[in-house]
Amino acid sequence: MVPQPLPGRPGLVGVLALQGDFLEHLRLLGSLGAEGREVRVPADLADVSSLIVPGGESTTMSLLLGTSGLLEPLRRRLAEGMPALGTCAGMILLAAEIVDGRPDQHCFGAIDISVRRNAFGRQRDSFEADLDVDGLVLPLHAVFIRAPVVERVGPDVEVLATVRMGDGQEKPVVCRQGPVLVSSFHPELVGDARLHELFLETQPRTRKDHVRAL
C-alpha cells in the first residue's frame, strides 16, 4: 500500500555525515524545500524527525558509528520508529541481517531484510539501469556502485522495485517497511529527487505547504 501524502512541510531531516555522499543528499533535500542537518555526534539528533543514511563504505561507517558515540542513540531512535531512508551502504546499515558482513559490523534492524554486500561485483562492475518503482509514474534512473542486493524480505516488507541479476533472478533493490525506505543504488547521484519525495511524504509535518506530485 502506498502511504498517503500528509499536508505541510517535513520536519528537520538528519543526514548521517560520518562518511559517504551525504552532501548530495543535503542538496536534494534543499531542492525539495526540506531542511536538512548533518548528523555527526549524538547532540545532532536532538531535533531531527527523520534520518537519511547515505551510500559510502558500510564497514567504515559501522566503525565510525561506534567511535562517534552515535551507535546506541541511533539504535534507540530507530527502534522508537524514527523514519529513515537508506541508500546503498545505508540499506546495509538499516537491514536486519548482513549475510556476508564482518563479525564486528553493525546493523540496526530497522527494516526486516537480509542483504548481501557488493552483490554485483567490484567497482568496475558498476552499472546503470532504469527501474519501475511502485509509487513513481516514470522509470527511475539508478546508479549501482558496488551495490548490495536484498536476499530475504520479511512478511511486512513491501518490494517497490527489482533488478535482474546475471543468473536471471529478479532481486529486490527498493524496499519499504512502515516509515523506513531503502534502495541498493544512489538516487542522489543523478539528481532525481522522487525517491526522496516518496520518503518525505510520510514524515511529520511542521506547517502547511504544497505537496509535489510524483
Image (spheres, rainbow, N blue to C red):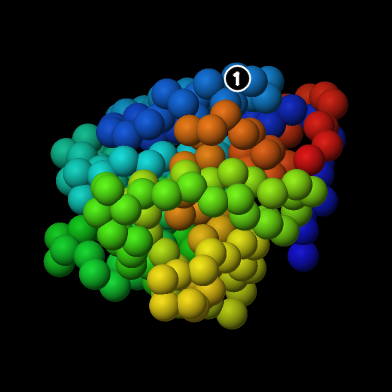
Q: Position of residue 61 (x, y in %)?
A: 25, 43
Give the quarter of the figure containing the C terminus: top right
Count of numbered circles on the image: 1
The residue drawn where x is 42% and y is 49% is: 127
Left or right: where 8 falls relative to 18: right
Label 1 packing within 10 angstroms: few (<14), some (14-19), many (20+)? few
Name the amino acid type tagged 1.
Gly
Depth check: 45 or 145 in front? 145
Query: Residue at horizontal 41%, vertical 71%?
Result: 166
Q: Secondary structure at mark 1?
A: helix
Rendering coords of residue 210 (x, y %): 84, 26
Residue closest to the eye, 71 or 156: 156
- Which residue is depicted at the point 49% across and 78% down? 169
- The location of residue 174, given as percent across then percent down, is 56, 58
Q: Is residue 42 among what the camera can see?
A: no
Q: Of residues 151 and 143, which is closer to you in this image?
A: 143
Name which residue lies at 74% across and 28% down.
9
Residue 155 visible in rendering: yes
Left or right of 49 in this view: 148: left
Give the camera-side residue of 119 and 76: 119
- Where residue 161 appears, as percent x and y from the top left, is 61, 62
Q: On screen, 187 above or below 153?
A: above
Query: In the rendered view of the protein, which quadrant contains the N terminus?
Result: bottom right
Q: Is residue 62 above or below residue 46?
A: below
Q: Which residue is mark 1?
A: 30
- Vertical order, 111 against 16 (above or below): below
Is 70 located above or below residue 22 in the figure?
A: below
